[in-house]
Amino acid sequence: MRSMICAALVALCLGAAPPDPVAWKVQDAPAKPVKAGARFAVKLVAHIQDGWHMYGLKPIADGPIPTRIWVAEGQPAQLAAAVQGSEPVTMQDPSFNMEVQLYEGEATFTMPLRLAAAAHEGAEKIVVNASYQTCDNKICLPPKTVKVEVPVTVSK
């Protein structure tokens, strides 16, 4: 009975929330062809609706779910170094009763990538995953993972 009540409350809260208060887009995709095996950087930008936030990249023990960005398996590129995020806001979160890092408004993540040496020449789309959780001052939505395609032209 208790689990049914909890499920009903979650459904009610989710029904009142926007489908996803974060919109993701690629910024600074390479305008010129990139040689197979070469490094390049791409920015992934999260536009966060007013009143909502998502958490920083740094995991906190027993804390909120951090934002995580990675290249999907089987892609013609991989991360060449750690993803760097814009500076998050550090604040005391009453829901978790701890200091957390979060993003409001907009967050930019720079992904240093390296094309595979065997990448096929021509137009490619590199699939990047972003996993995150959004909260407002009343509720947290379930964690979500989205796929974003990064266009790149491969040259030899």
Image (tube, rainbow, N blue to C red):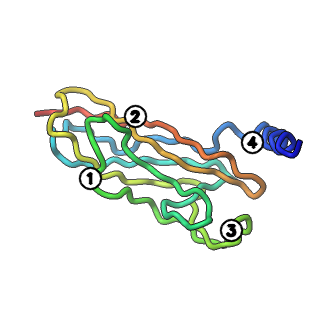
* x, y percent for residue 120: 18, 28
SS class, disc 4:
loop
* x, y percent for residue 132: 55, 49
Distance Cα–Cα, label 3 vs label 4: 20 Å
Q: Amino acid at mark 4?
A: Ala
Q: Residue at 63% across / 55% down in the picture?
A: 53
Distance Cα–Cα, label 3 vs label 2: 33 Å
Q: Which residue is mark 4?
A: 17
Q: Which residue is mark 1?
A: 80
Instruction: Count residues near mark 4 (Cα–Cα under 10 Å), then give few for <14, some for 14-19, many for 20+.
Output: some
Q: Which mark sits nearer the N-terminus, 1 or 4?
A: 4
Q: Which residue is mark 3?
A: 93
Q: Nearer the viewer, mark 1 or mark 2?
A: 1
Q: Is residue 81 above or below residue 113?
A: below
Q: Which mark is residue 149?
A: 2
Q: Which mark sits nearer the N-terminus, 1 or 2?
A: 1
Q: Amino acid at mark 3?
A: Asp
Distance Cα–Cα, label 4 vs label 2: 26 Å
Distance Cα–Cα, label 1 vs label 2: 18 Å
Instruction: Count residues near mark 1 (Cα–Cα under 10 Å), then give few for <14, some for 14-19, many for 20+.
Output: some
Q: Residue at 68% across / 47% down in the picture?
A: 141
Q: Quadrant of the image for the C terminus?
A: top left
Extreme left residue here?
A: 156
Report if the CB atoms under discs 3 and 1 are less than 8 Å apart: no
Distance Cα–Cα, label 3 vs label 1: 33 Å
Q: Is residue 123 above or below residue 55?
A: above
